[in-house]
Image (spheres, rainbow, N blue to C red):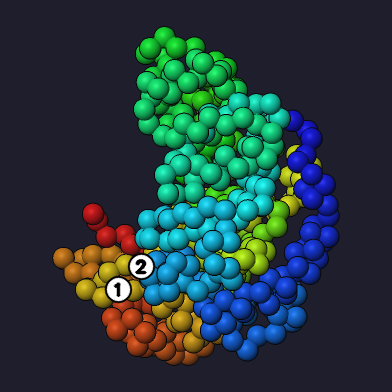
Amino acid sequence: MSAHHDDLETRSPEAREADLFARLPAVLAAALKAPAYAARLSGIDPAGITDRNALSTLPVLRKADLPALHKEALPFGGFATAVPGAFGRLFTSPGPIFEPEGTQADPWGSARGLFAAGFRTGDIVLNTFGYHLTPGGFIMDSGARALGCAVIPAGPGNTEQQMEVIAAYRPSAYAGTPDFLKILVEAADSRGVDISCIKRAVVSGAAFPPSLQAWVRARGIDAYQLYATADLGVIAYETEAREGMLLNENLIVEIVRPGTGDPVEQGEVGEIVVTNLDPLHPQIRLAVGDLTAVMPGLSACGRTNTKIRGWMGRADQTAKIKGMFVRPEQVAEIARRHSEIHKLRLVVGRTEEVDTMTLKAEIYAEPAGLVDAVSASLQQITKLRGTVEILPLGALPNDGKVIADERPV
């Protein structure tokens, strides 16, 4: 599978960056016509947002805040520039969050990831993602059909009927969660049904640990991971190089320190923030709540987009300590008050049935009184007392954790 979906995948990183940021000002200008963005982005000049430094000055929109924002201004919280009837399909996800689908071919950008997994014109795809109200099924369905595949809209569950459909149509490819793929294979074994026609798979929506990867591979199925959300579609996808995941085209992806909008250094774990280029439903610096890190170098598959390490956990690390919620944003505010601090981690423990807090601080320098000053900021911002531990640069793990809750369950 050495061919690529299109020439966009092999253009130089510099050409890609120039193209994305040349298109961004028009999207920002469109976004300002939506009432919520008009308020959030008041005073910005779209023509001046032409690089990552400029983009990083715009506020982050947190996915965790969308349910409340959508409820205040149904259905899209004032973030869409078109009325619901202008879209192709209308969905809802738990929260609720309301998501529109565009009318263009492959509106979720999944065809590229499916192509990288070996899906080709004429393939028959057993799609076991849900089709009821949530967009998962249609994310894969639209991409497969854009590639010229026939799609079986199977949805999850009902393994007996799934066996009948597989026997009748002999699909060559599977789309769904890795767990359900295992269930189908085991169900086929127990019923004596031959499903060896399935040679390729794209999996998403659940962990795909190495042990399960090896199990699927041993069954003769070549499986690839996609990283997607109901808001944005496919953000990244795995290729035959098996070197992390490649970012999708037509998205601007930043990795920021959790609780902030500040980009981290390359290789450091942080929260995924995505800006799309859809003028009808723009997503400007949407923090999706997941952690990852950028990997160095270009992929051996020949595609030139940025590599990330895939999903590495959740960025929302809010903890309730002594009856008070402490959030990553508060830890970030402490760092902003003290220029000597490089990185912070608030470690929550429990001693003699009492919650404890230790703020571990990597610092550039330690002037006199720094510990007392940081301790005072900790109490002022969180309304709780804690200890401060000073550490040298590089002492904290590179795992994206800002609040580490180490209390026993």
Image side of residue 408 versus residue 208, left or right = left
The amino acid at mark 1 is Phe
- Where residue 325 is drawn, which disc sits there? 1
In this rendered view, identify the residue nearer to me: 116 or 124: 124
- Name the residue: 54% across, 61% down: 85
- Name the residue: 26% across, 71% down: 321
In this rendered view, identify the residue nearer to me: 144 or 74: 74
> Which residue is situated farthest in the top direction here?
192
In this rendering, is residue 361 above or below 134? below
In this rendering, is residue 103 above or below 36? above
Q: Nearer the N terminus, badge 2 or badge 1?
A: 2
List x then y, in percent, for residue 23.
Answer: 75, 68
Image side of residue 371 versus residue 263, left or right = left
In this rendering, is residue 171 above or below 336? above
Where is the C terminus found, in terms of image quarters? Answer: bottom left
**Disc 1 secondary structure class:** strand
Where is the N terminus found, in terms of image quarters? Answer: top right
